[in-house]
Amino acid sequence: MPALGRTLIIVGAILVLAGVVLTLGARLPFRLGRLPGDMVIRGKHSVFYFPLTTCLLLSILLSVVLSLLLRRR
């Protein structure tokens, strides 16, 4: 059961951090989803948006965090 408790604490901390980022997102010096490298293609009647750089940064961040959390000792 201690492993379940630890997992719930980690998930809760991640949710709190996500909530803080979403709440204070407008005040951050960078905006996720509007980074250089994110693609926006505007047509006459449509807009295609793909946040390539944002996806790469989030993937790297999650990979590092999960590798630190799941490291076997």
Image (cartoon, rainbow, N blue to C red):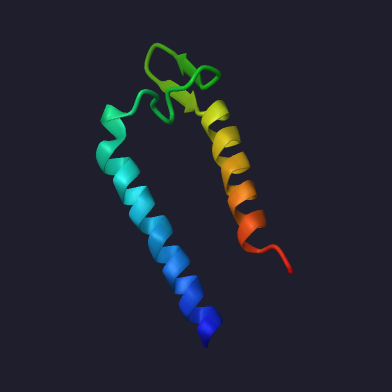
Q: Residue at x 48, y 16 (%)?
A: 41
Placement of 59 over or under 41, stated as above or below: below
Instruction: Give how far across and how far down residue 26 sits, in percent.
Output: 27, 29
Q: Nearer the viewer, residue 16 or 34?
A: 16
Count how many numbered circles sit on residues in the image.
0
Q: Is residue 45 left or right of residue 40?
A: left
Q: Quadrant of the C terminus?
A: bottom right
Q: Residue at x 51, y 80 (%)?
A: 4
Residue 28, picture quadrant:
top left
Instruction: Give how far across and how far down residue 38 sits, in percent.
Output: 52, 22
Instruction: Give how far across and how far down residue 19 sits, in percent.
Output: 31, 50
Q: Nearer the viewer, residue 42 or 32?
A: 32
Q: Residue at x 40, y 24 (%)?
A: 30
Placement of 7 over or under 58, stated as above or below: below
Q: Nearer the viewer, residue 23 or 51?
A: 23
Placement of 28 over or under 60, stated as above or below: above
